[in-house]
Amino acid sequence: MQKRVVQQITKWATLGLAAVLLAGCDRGSRPGQLGQPAPEFAINDGTQSVDLAKLRGRVVVLNFWASWCQPCVEELPSLTALQRGLPQVQIVTISMDTDPDAYRRFLVRYHVELFSILDGPEGANAKFNTFRPPETYVIDKSGIIRRKFIGPQDWTSPEIVNFLKKLSA
């Protein structure tokens, strides 16, 4: 009898866990945001400011990152190379850090040359439903989300570069 109860509990726990995992967040291969207008935001961190609406007419690569995120460090060199190679594309990196000092130390330590702004963990990223960096959105000239990248990328890959070139033509 006790063995049967344990089996039933295990069965329901497994089903519950599977349901939670399948529900997941918007990190699938075809996020619901694609083809939708990018959420508007304006940020001023006291040093830098950015207003997404003012970037209309340009392709924007919007990268959410944090100083404690090792995959963010991994993709930084190729993201910088992308900006150098495609200056017509505006790369905006938004830090989700809660500690302004950690943010500033990261910028100095890794010689960040990209446009970067500190927004915290519940700022613009929350409007995009992004809470686990790095996540990056490609927004077209009209302000429509065309791609979402989850995790670190090689931003110099021919597939990504060609996609951005076509989008910015």
Image (cartoon, rainbow, N blue to C red):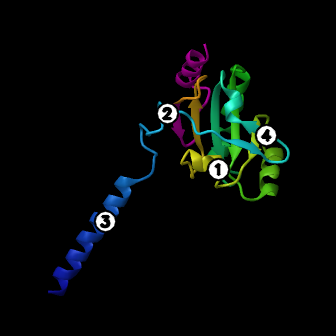
In the depicted structure, whether residue 37 falls above or below residue 133: above
Magenta highlight range: 146-169
In the depicted structure, whether residue 17 falls above or below residue 85: below
Amino acid at pointer 2: Gln
Q: Residues within 10 Å of mark 3 (few under 14, many from 20)?
A: few
Q: Nearer the viewer, mark 4 or mark 1?
A: 4
Image coords of residue 59 (percent x, y)? 63, 24
- Identify the mark at residue 16; answer none if there is no mark: 3
Q: Measuring 53% from the left and 37% from the top, which residue is drawn there? A: 149
Q: Regarding mark 4 in the picture, which secondary structure is present there? A: strand
Image coords of residue 131 (percent x, y)? 57, 52
- Identify the mark at residue 49; answer none if there is no mark: 4
Task: Find the distance from the CA under tag 4 to the CA under tag 2.
Answer: 24 Å
The answer to whether the residues at label 1 and label 2 have Cβ atoms under 8 Å apart is no
**Quadrant containing the C terminus in the rendered view:** top right
Task: Find the distance from the CA under tag 1 to the CA under tag 3.
Answer: 31 Å
Image coords of residue 73 (percent x, y)? 68, 44
Q: Nearer the viewer, residue 87 or 121?
A: 121
Q: Regarding mark 2 in the picture, which secondary structure is present there? A: loop
